[in-house]
């Protein structure tokens, strides 16, 4: 097995952002993350626990359409699942607070 290139989140996050250059891809991530929050709240209110099975479908569905159709790259989730999940929520929070700035990142 090969050793992974990113050993910590701080070094991974710029790479993650470099994989999200396309605005539509980022918007799809944002919509998917927002829908996940809504689904969790609705599930807690109505206690229809089976709805939780929809979380990965919504989360990955929106993100993967963004990557495969618009960004035309392979989601980092396949190689770095935990860092990618964390990075998605960091990016979502930054976008929500209007603190998101896409710099000149290179992988």
Image (cartoon, rainbow, N blue to C red):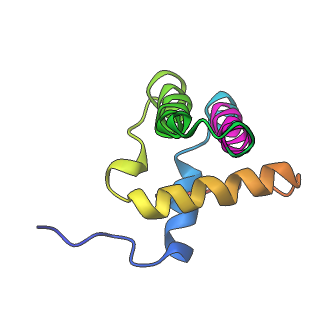
**Nearest the eye: 23 or 45:** 45
**Furthest residue toward front:** 47
Horizontal side of residue 106 vs 34, given as left or right? left
The quadrant of the picture occupied by the N terminus is: bottom left
Q: Residue at x 44, y 63 (%)?
A: 82
Horizontal side of residue 59 vs 39, given as left or right? left
Q: Residue at x 71, y 36 (%)?
A: 46
Residue 16: x, y in percent? 53, 55
Residue 13: x, y in percent? 56, 64
Asked if residue 73 is positioned above or below residue 79 in the image, the reply reads above
Residue 65 visible (yes or no): yes
Q: Is residue 42 magenta?
A: yes
Residue 47: x, y in percent? 65, 41
Q: Residue at x 67, y 37 (%)?
A: 39
Asked if residue 61 is positioned above or below residue 80 in the image, the reply reads above
Asked if residue 30 is positioned above or below residue 13 in the image, the reply reads above
**Nearest the eye: 57 or 77:** 57
**Nearest the eye: 3 or 87:** 87
Horizontal side of residue 58 vs 40, given as left or right? left
Magenta residues (range): 28-43
Horizontal side of residue 93 vs 43, given as left or right? right
Residue 101 visible (yes or no): no
Q: Is residue 41 magenta?
A: yes
**Furthest residue toward right:** 98
The quarter holding residue 68 reads: top left
How many numbered marks are there? Answer: 0
**Furthest residue toward left:** 1
Residue 7: x, y in percent? 39, 78
Main secondary structure of the magenta stretch: helix
């Amino acid at each position: 097995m090969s050793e992974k290139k990113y050993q910590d989140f701080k070094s991974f996050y710029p790479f993650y952002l470099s994989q999200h250059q396309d605005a539509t891809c980022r918007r799809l991530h944002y919509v998917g993350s927002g829908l996940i929050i809504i689904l969790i709240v609705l599930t807690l209110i109505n206690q229809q626990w089976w709805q939780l099975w929809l979380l990965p479908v919504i989360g990955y569905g929106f993100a993967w359409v963004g990557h495969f159709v618009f960004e035309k790259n392979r989601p980092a989730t396949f190689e770095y699942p935990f860092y990618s999940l964390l990075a998605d929520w960091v990016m979502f929070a930054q976008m929500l607070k209007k603190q998101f700035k896409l710099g000149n990142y290179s992988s």
